[in-house]
Image (cartoon, rainbow, N blue to C red):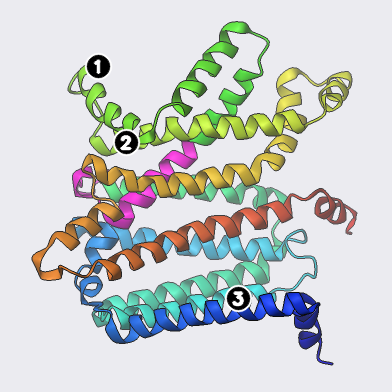
């Protein structure tokens, strides 16, 4: 029997009950998928997405300055390809040592299909279509170069490469907002997917160190520090996010002088950061509780100081345990950015409401909401895939096998 048929039989039709349940679920999913495809290809009016594709992507960002966003996208694409290739070239990244594993080929094929289909489906101008195709080619080229020659790089260079990402973030902030000779673009002109990703990434980057500090503070032996962390965490977890967003928008304007009060977008971003940090602290605290006390005692007996014990022994183990919960919090944070539309910010949902309020596009809610669902699913799926890859890479068995390789 064919190996694939044997596996399907073992997984789906091992018993008569399993076979009946599998057939029922397959029929249900097939009917739902067929109905969705028929509606999307025959009844849906995608003109609402085609006419507002730029608004969904970048909001009211000035058209004359959108070349900065294309440059930033190209830099991020190149960094993604290089990181992807270097992970595959590293001995720990793939057990079989293949340059192009099956999953990588599937992902690259899917990305190529999207790069070819999306510009055609949105009926973009030839110049925009060529940019999409160049980005796809750049991703494939950098992935191949890093995978082919990454094994020749020294360990210090590989350890320094992750610093490219925070550097790119700073460069991206300059390109988006202006400065250093570029024309300033007010945050009030940011919107759509750009604002969603920017606010979510800002909150994710800052809530992680803040959450770790709060978790350590809650486990501290110093009563003042411990109770400060407890009060902060319990207060934030006890208040709805939308309430905190409204408080951040209104109270900061009264508490701070006019010149010091941040823009409305940055107020919302800081509220998201402080909100996520409280939940992240509890995830990290659960990881710290999972580390046996003997680990810290053994490290101290070897002469390590308390900070060295935390950084080299306790935190690496705790963060590995808390990683799934932390990534779940990051995904929730990305989804929580939709609440920014309730305080007047034009992120993805805010743009969608603006488009659906246009008399020209009344009655096209299903097309708009389906597009938003696909965009959010893509971003959340990317975070989930990255989390699973990192979990596999940090698995103790994988690390021990890598350490024994010549």
Foreground label between 3 and 1: 3
Q: Where's residue 99, x and y in %? A: 70, 73
- Mark pair 3, 2: CA separation: 43 Å
Q: Label 1, on which residue?
A: 255
Density class for disc 3 (Cα within 10 Å; few <14, some 14-19, many ≥20) is few
Where residue 259 sits in the image (x, y, percent)? 19, 23
Q: Earlier in the sequence, mark 3 or mark 1?
A: 3
Q: Which residue is mark 2?
A: 268
Q: Is residue 315 above or below residue 91?
A: above
Q: Is residue 341 visible?
A: yes
170 within the magenta span: no
The kind of secondary structure the magenta stretch mainly shows is helix
Q: Quadrant of the N terminus?
A: bottom right
Residue nearest the viewer, comparing 136 with 43: 43
Categorize mark 1 by other alpha carbons within 10 Å: few (<14), some (14-19), many (20+). few
Disc 3 to disc 1, how far (Cα)?
57 Å
Q: Earlier in the sequence, mark 2 or mark 1?
A: 1
Secondary structure found at label 3: helix
Residue drawn at x 18%, y 62% is: 355
Q: From what the image shows, is residue 345 above or below residue 131?
A: above
Q: Split into 4 quadrants, where in the image is the C terminus?
A: bottom right
User: Residue beneath label 3, please?
Assistant: 25
Q: Nearer the viewer, residue 350 or 129?
A: 350
Residue 254: where, in percent of width, then height? Answer: 20, 18
Magenta-highlighted residues: 179-206
- For residue 318, which quarter of the picture? top right
Place residue 34 in its image quadrant.
bottom left
| x and y percentages locating residue 384 in the rendered image | 57, 56
Above or below for 17 versus 246: below
């Amino acid at each position: 029997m064919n190996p694939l048929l044997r596996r399907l039989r073992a997984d789906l039709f091992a018993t008569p009950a399993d076979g009946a349940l599998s057939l029922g679920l397959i029929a249900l999913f097939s009917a739902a998928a067929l109905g969705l495809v028929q509606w999307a290809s025959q009844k849906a009016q995608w003109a609402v997405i085609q006419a507002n594709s730029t608004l969904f992507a970048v909001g009211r960002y000035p058209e004359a300055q959108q070349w900065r966003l294309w440059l930033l996208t190209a830099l991020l694409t190149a960094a993604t390809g290089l990181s992807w290739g270097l992970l595959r070239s590293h001995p720990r990244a793939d057990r079989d040592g293949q340059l192009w594993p099956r999953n990588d080929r599937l992902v690259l094929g899917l990305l190529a299909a999207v790069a070819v289909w999306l510009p055609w489906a949105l009926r973009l101008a030839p110049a925009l279509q060529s940019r999409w195709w160049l980005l796809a080619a750049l991703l494939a080229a950098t992935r191949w170069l890093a995978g082919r020659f990454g094994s020749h790089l020294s360990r210090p260079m590989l350890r320094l490469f992750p610093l490219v990402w925070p550097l790119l973030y700073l460069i991206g902030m300059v390109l988006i907002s202006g400065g250093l000779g570029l024309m300033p673009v007010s945050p009030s002109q940011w919107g759509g997917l750009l604002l969603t990703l920017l606010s979510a990434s800002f909150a994710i980057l800052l809530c992680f160190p803040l959450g770790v500090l709060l978790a350590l503070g809650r486990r501290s032996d110093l009563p003042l520090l411990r109770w400060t962390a407890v009060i902060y965490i319990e207060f934030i977890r006890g208040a709805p996010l939308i309430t905190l967003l409204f408080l951040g928008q209104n109270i900061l304007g009264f508490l701070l002088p006019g010149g010091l009060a941040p823009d409305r977008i940055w107020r919302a971003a800081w509220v998201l950061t402080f909100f996520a940090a409280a939940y992240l602290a509890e995830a990290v605290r659960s990881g710290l509780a999972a580390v046996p006390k003997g680990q810290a005692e053994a490290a101290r007996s070897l002469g390590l100081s308390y900070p060295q014990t935390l950084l080299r022994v306790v935190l690496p183990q705790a963060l590995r345990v808390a990683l799934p919960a932390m990534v779940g919090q990051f995904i929730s944070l990305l989804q929580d950015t939709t609440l920014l539309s309730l305080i007047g910010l034009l992120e993805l949902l805010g743009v969608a409401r603006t488009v659906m309020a246009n008399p020209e596009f009344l009655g096209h809610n299903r097309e708009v909401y389906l597009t938003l669902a696909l965009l959010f699913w893509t971003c959340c799926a990317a975070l989930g895939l990255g989390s699973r890859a990192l979990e596999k890479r940090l698995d103790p068995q994988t690390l021990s096998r890598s350490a024994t390789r010549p």
